[in-house]
Image (spheres, helix red, strand yellow):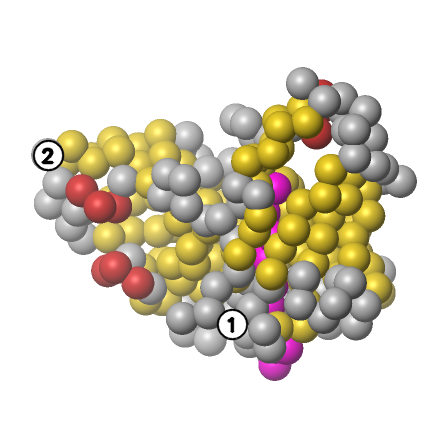
Amino acid sequence: EPEVTQTPSHQVTQMGQEVILRCVPISNHLYFYWYRQILGQKVEFLVSFYNNEISEKSEIFDDQFSVERPDGSNFTLKIRSTKLEDSAMYFCASRPRGGRVTYEQYFGPGTRLTVT
Amino acid sequence: AQSVTQLDSHVSVSEGTPVLLRCNYSSSYSPSLFWYVQHPNKGLQLLLKYTSAATLVKGINGFEAEFKKSETSFHLTKPSAHMSDAAEYFCVVSDNLQTNAGGTSYGKLTFGQGTILTVHP
């Protein structure tokens, strides 16, 4: 069964460094998402991506964040200059082109980002 | 705007007894509602979904949920808990892919805070 994969599973970085989190969505999916979960808090929406552009983003997704689908396969989240408060589990998700009823998203296992 | 409240942060049951995980939602539009489960060190797995068809929704592993619009609830139930059900459960609402007053939405999910289910032998 196809699944969303994410690498690395755990990333440790120093404050101020750039990190790139990688995701490979399911191959025939067209909508892509990033979410994050700070320890002990809710899973929060960051950004959605469709047709090679950001379709929606949250207040969390400021200029320090960017997303890219560089090769039609990978979907990346870049944080330019990490802060301590960026420490969280980051989930990638994808969804097929839906009709009126298919809105479920398929999630990857997550990347745990630790900023020291 | 949409939001989800899971009424219990922890639920503990004995194996073989019923499970009830409570969820209330708020949505400006006709919502889609989901329950996802997360086992330790695993990703989020879809248990079931409601998308404006039957109000009683059956999912995997014997779980089901009933959409009650009048109560704005979408509680998750299972008649008999199994040890393998121990996990964290998330109630999730989605605004649908449609043009609304604010423009087109692309299925952003809003999560509840999660309920940790513990199953005792």
Q: What segment carries the magenta color?
A: A90-99
Foreground residue among A3 and B23: A3
Foreground residue among A85 and A15: A15
Label 1 crowd bin: few (<14), some (14–19), many (20+), radius 10 Å: few
Left or right of residue A65: residue B62: left
In x, y percent, where is residue A58? 77, 45
Foreground residue among B78 and A8: A8
Tell me if residue A84 is in the magenta stretch: no
The amino acid type found where label 2 is placed reads Pro
Q: Is the magenta stretch mostly helix, strand or loop?
A: strand
User: At 76% across and 22% down in the image, what residue appears?
Assistant: A15
Q: Can residue A112 be seen in this view?
A: yes
Q: Is residue A103 visible?
A: no
The amino acid type found where label 1 is placed reads Ser
Q: Mark 1 points at which residue?
A: B52
In x, y percent, where is residue A65? 81, 42
Left or right of residue B66: residue B4: right
Q: Residue furthest right?
A: A63
User: At 89% across and 40% down in the image, what residue appears?
Assistant: A63
Of the numbered discs in the image, which one, if any, rests on residue B121?
A: 2
